[in-house]
Structure formats: structure tokens, C-alpha cells
Image: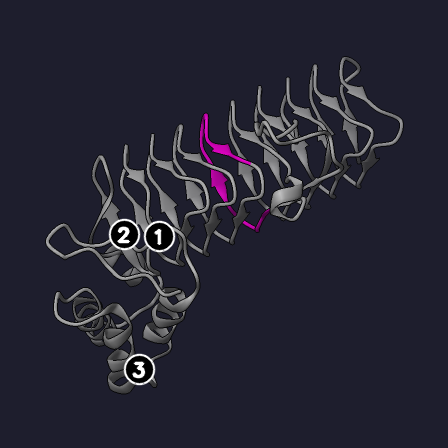
């Protein structure tokens, strides 16, 4: 049974699913869609063209779907799409897309956004992602499944973070993070693999050792990045996880790869 507090302001055009709970002083805009069993605790603002999937809970003072913080934005209709079973804690902000990014910000399922986290315009976020307190994504960031972003970390616009990666708290991420990578530091550098995440994800010790060997070769100082990637394909071509890293590296990227501190600057594929 849907329960709407009398102090909540619900626009007539809003679509409200079954068994939704909307607490005191919430505001829901005319182009908002709330899936079944969505919970807005209190003082939540959901605006813009925003769709929220079933089973998502949003805590007080979150602002979801407000205009992008982009000076190029001119009011074009754009969307914020949030999947199912997400937890969005206090003071989280999430913005819809812009014309320069496909007019869409997308968040997957079963994610946790802790207090004060920010998801900027045109971000694409996978499933089971955790953003800790005050972690921030710039515009156009892509985040793979099961990524953990530590508290107060800041990710530069257009950066890609591969699946199962972990970003250390207070890190400034200015380059792409390979799948399964672990980065940390004021200007983040690659500090190895996300061993804890891999173990929790069911990867065997032998698989992890093989991945470590492959990543060490990927970031060796000898030769070009392209040559090292080609060699990885020959040596580990049948390993799906390493194939995922290779595919990630070969995709076009603006800012290169987040690398170990000891490594020389990497070439970038054209």
C-alpha cells in the first residue's frame, strides 16, 4: 500500500508505483517516475526527467535529478535513470545528462551512495557500486560493476573506472583505472590489484596470481603499450579477466592509464 505523508508535494504528472512510501516534506516533480516499493524518507527532492527503479531507498536532503552543473547546459530535456534496489543516503546529489553526453545519466542496480556523494551529468555507473562519503564523480565518468570509491575521492571528468576496481579515500583520479585495479594517492597511482574485492568476487588464488603477472607485464617499462598488449594477448588470450583488461586498455581514452609510480609515461592508442 502506497503511503504519502500529507506534507509531501507530489506533482500531478508524477508516476508513483505500488507500495511506495513518501515521507514528510518530500518534493516529487511532474516528470518523475518512482518504481514499486521506492522509499523517500523525508525532505527528499526528486525533479527533472528522473526514473527510479523498484526497491530504492533515498534518505533525507538528497537532491536527485536537478539541472546539471554544466555551463553548456541550456535546458535541453535530459534524463536521470536509476536502477533497482539502490540506497542513496543523506545529501547525495545526482544530475541528469546533457546534449554533449547523450542526454542521459544512468545508474545500475544495488548500489550504495553514502552521505554527500555526487554523481555529475552523463555518468554511466554499473551494478553493486559503492561510493563512500563525499566521493565525487565529474561529468561523463564511466564506472564498471562492483567498483568501490573511497571517501572524499574525486574522479576527473571523462575518466573510466573498470569493473572490480577500488579507489582509495581522498584520491584524485586523473587517469583511467584498469579493471581489478587498486589506486591511491593525492594524484592517484596504481598500487596493485583489488585483492580483497577479487577474493570476495570468487576469484581463485591461481587466477589472481595470473592477473598480477599480466598487469606487471602490462606496465613494464620496455617497449610500447601497444606491443605489450599484443604480447598479453598471445600469452593470456584465453583468460577472460585478462581479456577484459586488454579490451579496456584498447578502447580510446583521453587521459591515459593510471599507472604505477615507477613506470614511465604510457603511450596512448590513437
Residue 250 shows up from this direction: yes
Q: Cβ–Cβ below 8 Å for labels 2 and 3?
A: no
* Residue occupying image coordinates x 22% and y 69%: 218
In the image: residue 127, left or right of residue 260: right
* Residue occupying image coordinates x 45% and y 40%: 157
**Residue 126 x, y percent position in the rendering:** 51, 53
Confirm whether the magenta stretch covers residue 80: no
Q: Secondary structure at mark 1?
A: loop
Of all residues, the one furthest to the front in this rendering is 270
Give the number of the disc on residue 258: 2
Q: Which residues are magenta?
A: 106-120
- Real-space CA distance between mark 2 and mark 3, rounded to the nearest whole angstrom: 21 Å
* Residue occupying image coordinates x 73% and y 43%: 35
Q: Cβ–Cβ below 8 Å for labels 2 and 1?
A: yes
Q: Secondary structure at mark 3?
A: helix
In the image: residue 10, left or right of residue 258: right
Q: Which residue is mark 3?
A: 233
Q: Secondary structure at mark 2?
A: loop
Amino acid at each position: 500500500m502506497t503511503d504519502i505523508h500529507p506534507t509531501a508535494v507530489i506533482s500531478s504528472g508524477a508516476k508513483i508505483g505500488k507500495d511506495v512510501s513518501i515521507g514528510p516534506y518530500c518534493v516529487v516533480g511532474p516528470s518523475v517516475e518512482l518504481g514499486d516499493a521506492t522509499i523517500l524518507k523525508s525532505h527528499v527532492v526528486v525533479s527533472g526527467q528522473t526514473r527510479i527503479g523498484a526497491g530504492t531507498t533515498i534518505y533525507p536532503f538528497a537532491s536527485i535529478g536537478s539541472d546539471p552543473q554544466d555551463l553548456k547546459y541550456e535546458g535541453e530535456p535530459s534524463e536521470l535513470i536509476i536502477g533497482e534496489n539502490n540506497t542513496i543516503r543523506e545529501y547525495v546529489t545526482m544530475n541528469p545528462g546533457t546534449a554533449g553526453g547523450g542526454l542521459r545519466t544512468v545508474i545500475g542496480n544495488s548500489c550504495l551512495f553514502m552521505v554527500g556523494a555526487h554523481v555529475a551529468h552523463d555518468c554511466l555507473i554499473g551494478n553493486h557500486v559503492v561510493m563512500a562519503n563525499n566521493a565525487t564523480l565529474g561529468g561523463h565518468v564511466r564506472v564498471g560493476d562492483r567498483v568501490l570509491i573511497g571517501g572524499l575521492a574525486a574522479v576527473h571528468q571523462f575518466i573510466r573506472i573498470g569493473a572490480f576496481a577500488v579507489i582509495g579515500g581522498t584520491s584524485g583520479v586523473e587517469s583511467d583505472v584498469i579493471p581489478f585495479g587498486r589506486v591511491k594517492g593525492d594524484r592517484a597511482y596504481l598500487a596493485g590489484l583489488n585483492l580483497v574485492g577479487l577474493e570476495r568476487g570468487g576469484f581463485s588464488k591461481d587466477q589472481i596470481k595470473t592477473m598480477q603477472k599480466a598487469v606487471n607485464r602490462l606496465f613494464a617499462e620496455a617497449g610500447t603499450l601497444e606491443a605489450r598488449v599484443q604480447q598479453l594477448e598471445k600469452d593470456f588470450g584465453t583468460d577472460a579477466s585478462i581479456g577484459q583488461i586488454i579490451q579496456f586498455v584498447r578502447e580510446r581514452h583521453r587521459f591515459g592509464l593510471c599507472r604505477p609510480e615507477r613506470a614511465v609515461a604510457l603511450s596512448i592508442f590513437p
